[in-house]
Amino acid sequence: MKIVIATSNAHKVLEIADKLSSENRFTFISMTEVCPPMEIIEDGDTFTDNAIIKARAVCASSGLPSLADDSGLSVDALNGEPGIFSARYGNLPDDITRYERVLSLMVRIPDDKRTARFVCAMALVFPDGKCFTAEGFCEGSIARSPRGDHGFGYDPIFVPQGGKCTMAEIPLSEKNRISHRAIALDKMRIILASF
């Protein structure tokens, strides 16, 4: 069975396909292979709402089961920002300017108050309307400056709890064990295994 990964982000496609590779009854493909370019309005109030919106849109367009995620960074000292707006925070054009904005807002925040978490919500939608969801969280803190060249998004400024390296400094194999997306995918893999 083919399942469309409802993102055009090549990094996310790689992470998701790698994490679910043991489910060999399924073939995971990018939405760019089966859908025309489309703009999906993510106007939900939560990460889960937005994941469902994306999965339903791609499922309707492709006619295939679709797996979507909505994820982002929630910083306690910024009252949960950037939150569900992580990918478009401040209407800034790219990952670097977005994480630089977070760092600039936190210049005076002491180390013990720099707590944050990555959040990931996943939704698997089938053409018959069935919908399954899962969530994952990765607790940590915001670094003083960006470090590392692996990963994407806010990875260069996020230090997982108990670690010293940012998410952008650890290898994909380690990230796929501890990340918010990895935890949500572990739950989604249990759902897939039940079919």
Image (spheres, helix red, strand yellow):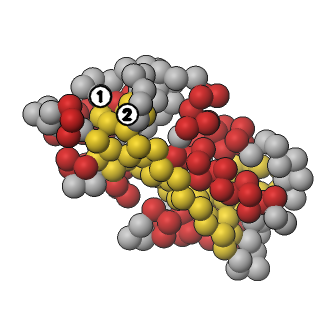
Q: Amino acid at mark 1?
A: Ala
Q: CA distance from mark 2 to mark 1?
A: 6 Å
The residue lying at 40 percent from left, 35 percent from top is 161
- Residue position marked by numbered label 2 in the rendering: 158
Residue 125 position (above or below residue 182): below
Q: Nearer the viewer, residue 55 or 92?
A: 55
Quarter of the N terminus within the rendering: bottom right
Asked whether the residues under the numbered discs 2 and 1 touch, taking CB atoms below 8 Å apart as contact, a structural biologist would say yes
Label 1 CA crowd tier, 10 Å (few <14, some 14–19, many 20+) = some
Residue behind mark 1 = 143
User: What element does badge 2 sit on?
Assistant: strand
Image check: 192 left or right of 79? Answer: right
Amino acid at the residue labelled 2: Phe
The image position of residue 80, as x and y in percent, is: 28, 54
Q: Earlier in the sequence, mark 2 or mark 1?
A: 1
Residue 10, can we see it? no
